[in-house]
């Protein structure tokens, strides 16, 4: 079955920064943070302090992954420009998303450069308190923050612009699901990552504020990520809610690339059960057509829209025009 990895991280140069400081490469995928925390970011053999396009292509070929969505985050440091370079060279195979820190003094200028010059049509917001914006900034209100609001207002003028959001689990200040039934939040606990993927242009920031959780639930992009403190009942609710027809066209497969592989040793990147839940005996719960959408069709529809691919193909960096 054809697959699109909807959650792949490329790393040209490791530049991690989060609440426990900067990561320092130790080689063979290991790092130590300034706080003294040691961890693995790449599986052994995937790269010493980088996971570049050639290595990613090899992994994709080994697991029959046809395309990938390139997401960013603080864990590796924003890899915006490298992701653009890779996707620009193969726009029908890679769809890049850029990241932004809305607290940067030139945040709006950064966003416009990536959208207008470099042709990005997806944004990744890593806001989780465990490793994103709220890990090294004071907590802020996702629905009311003016800095974020200005950025999303601007993006709303581009039809179908995708915004991937990781806002952490329910123990974190970044987890702001809003006044919805409590069981819905289990989707966030399960995935730790979702995607806003409006099929039409959003009229204004007011729309984003009023529909924050609804939009977050539009798309799950890390279905094979292990559950975080979820009960068997919660997982069952997730499985059945995923099966609902209203939700089905919004799910896609994304195993979180090198970090996902490093946290699941021995499990191939292509691992996924028919129910999305490792260990549950529900084979056949989803039809072949539905699994085809999860593996490929939904990500193709959202991230590889014809006009979005065209924008990437037509993109250019004016800073280097005329250079030999």
Image: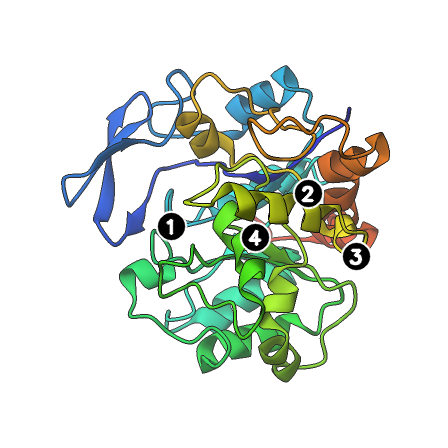
The residue identified by callout 2 is: 252
**Residue 318 is at least partly visible in this image:** no
Q: Is residue 196 above or below residue 26?
A: below
In what element is the residue under mark 2?
loop
Q: Is residue 234 above or below residue 293?
A: below
Label 1 vs 2, first from the N-terminus: 1
261 left or right, relative to 41 = right
The residue identified by callout 1 is: 74
Q: Position of residue 87 (x, y in %)?
A: 63, 40
Which residue corresponds to the image point at 47% horizontal and 26% vertical from the top-left? 261
CA separation in Å, label 2 and label 3:
14 Å
Q: Nearer the viewer, residue 158 or 167?
A: 167
Label 2 vs 3, first from the N-terminus: 3
Which residue corresponds to the image point at 61% horizontal and 55% vertical from the top-left? 195
Residue contact at pointers 3 and 4, CB within 8 angstroms: no
- Which image quarter is the C terminus in? top right
CA separation in Å, label 1 and label 4:
22 Å
**Disc 2 or disc 3, which is closer to the eye?**
3
Which residue corresponds to the image point at 30% horizontal and 58% vertical from the top-left? 135
CA separation in Å, label 1 and label 2:
23 Å
**Disc 1 or disc 2, which is closer to the eye?**
2
219 left or right, relative to 102 = right
């Amino acid at each position: 079955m054809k697959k699109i990895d909807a959650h792949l991280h490329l790393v040209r140069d490791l530049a991690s920064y989060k609440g426990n400081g900067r990561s320092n490469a130790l080689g063979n995928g290991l790092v130590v943070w300034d706080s003294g925390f040691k961890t693995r970011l790449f599986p052994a053999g995937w790269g010493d302090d980088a996971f570049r396009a050639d290595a990613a292509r090899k992994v994709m070929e080994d697991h029959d992954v046809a395309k990938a969505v390139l997401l960013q985050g603080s864990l590796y440091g924003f890899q915006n420009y490298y992701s653009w370079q890779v996707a620009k060279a193969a726009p029908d195979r890679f769809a890049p998303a850029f990241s932004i820190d809305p607290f940067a003094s030139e945040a709006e200028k950064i966003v416009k450069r990536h959208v207008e010059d470099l042709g990005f049509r997806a944004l990744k917001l890593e806001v989780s308190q465990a490793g994103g914006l709220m890990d090294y900034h004071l907590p802020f209100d996702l629905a009311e923050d003016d800095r974020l609001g200005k950025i999303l207002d601007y993006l709303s003028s581009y039809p179908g612009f995708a915004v991937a959001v990781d806002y952490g689990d329910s123990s974190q200040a970044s987890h702001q699901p809003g006044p919805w039934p409590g069981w819905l939040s289990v989707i966030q606990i399960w995935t730790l990552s979702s995607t806003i993927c409006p099929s039409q242009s959003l009229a204004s920031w007011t729309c984003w504020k009023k529909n924050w959780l609804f939009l977050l639930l539009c798309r799950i992009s890390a279905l094979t990520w292990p559950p975080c403190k979820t009960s068997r009942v919660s997982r069952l609710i997730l499985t059945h809610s995923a099966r609902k027809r209203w939700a089905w066209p919004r799910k896609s497969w994304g195993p979180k690339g090198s970090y996902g592989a490093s946290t699941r040793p021995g499990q191939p990147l292509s691992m996924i059960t028919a129910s999305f839940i490792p260990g549950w005996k529900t084979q056949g719960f989803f039809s072949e057509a539905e699994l085809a959408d999860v593996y490929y069709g939904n990500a193709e529809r959202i991230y590889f829209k014809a006009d979005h691919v065209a924008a990437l193909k037509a993109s250019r960096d004016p800073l280097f025009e005329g250079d030999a």
